[in-house]
Amino acid sequence: MSKQPIRITADSTCDLSPELLQQYGISTLPLYVVLNGQAYKDGVEITPDELYARVKADRKLGSTAAINVDEYLTFFTEVRKSCDTVIHFTISSEMSSCYQNACIAAEEVGGVYVIDSRNLSTGIGLQVLRACELAEKGLAAEVIVSYIREMAGRVDATFIPESLEFLKMGGRCSAATALSASLLRIKPCIQVREGAMVVGKKYTGSMEHVLMKYIGDRLGDLEKVDLSRVFITHSGMSDPALVDKVKDAVLAIAPFEDVQVTRAGCTVSMHCGPNTLGVLFCKK
């Protein structure tokens, strides 16, 4: 059997749907969720809904853990059997040691390019799918890697969490901040900036009201928006109809060619909790 010239792979944090992974032939490697000292493979041994149930029962948040060097070695070695070159995407090096570990393994295996996405969730997914499309066009690995590393700086990745409860449990905001946000119905926009999560604009009101305002803000200047693809990614919504309303609102403002609705995996869900939704796309 002849080898493929290039295969695109990623950590599970890319949050691409099973359908997209199959369509583009993308293999993924899971990070870990650690609960009460027990590690579970993200999306393989635990789902976000199971994670929420455990956190509710235990009344404490767990943590996430990176993929180690040995796991990357095994993964890259196996993938290289079917291709000449691997291009692998990791979660931002500002958020995890995955990139560092993958680089160590890649150097030993050979024929593997590791890309620091400088992002998370479908902020990575946008880059992964574009790499797949460029590979299908027959571009050389070096050209694809160069393009993607430039593209990473144009990804607009933001989320609106309905509650700050998980951020409070994870030590990312104080109990007082979480309480005041709940009382005042404040919902901050969590942005990825220079590879790290930061708090952006703060909104007030119901989740639906906030999301409509947020969409208008993110897509307000269409001249700067790459309309080829958008991800609407959520961590599980108590009102599923709200996802459809968001999709309709996005398309009413911006005629994206490809609209993908995806569910975030455990890594993002651990940080933001349920009822978190983001609109992720690229700028020109």
Image (spheres, rainbow, N blue to C red):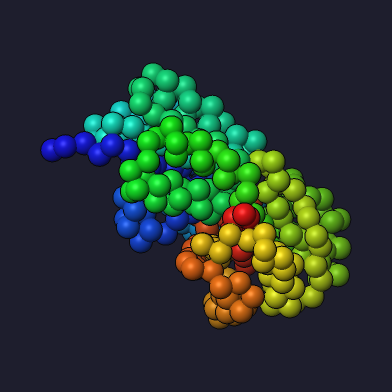
Residue 143 in sight: yes
Question: In the orientation shown, which residue stands out farthest toward the top?
Answer: 108
Whether residue 149 sits left or right of residue 172 in the image: it is: left
Residue 61 visible, this orientation: no
Q: Measuring 77% from the left and 61% from the top, which residue is drawn there?
A: 188
Q: Closer to the camera, 4 or 134? A: 134
What is the x, y in percent for residue 122? 53, 54
In the depicted view, which residue is nearer to us: 63 or 198? 198
Residue under the image location 35 percent in, 48 percent down: 137
Q: Is residue 218 above or below residue 95?
A: below
Position of residue 36 in the picture relative to residue 68 (left or right): right
Q: Point out residue 92 in the picture as x, y percentages from the top left corner.
A: 59, 39
Residue at 45% from the left image edge and 55% from the top image edge? 16
Work out whether residue 270 or residue 123 is closer to the camera in this orientation and state it.
Answer: 123
Question: Is residue 73 placed above or below 219 in the rendered structure?
Answer: above
For the C terminus, which image quadrant?
bottom right
Note whether 281 is above or below 30 in the view shown: below
Residue 205: percent from left, percent from top: 79, 75
Which residue lies most toward the left here? 1
The quadrant in which the N terminus is found is: top left
At 67% from the left edge and 66% from the top edge, which residue is drawn? Answer: 222
- Percent position of residue 13, x then y: 50, 47
Q: Is residue 81 left or right of residue 196?
A: left
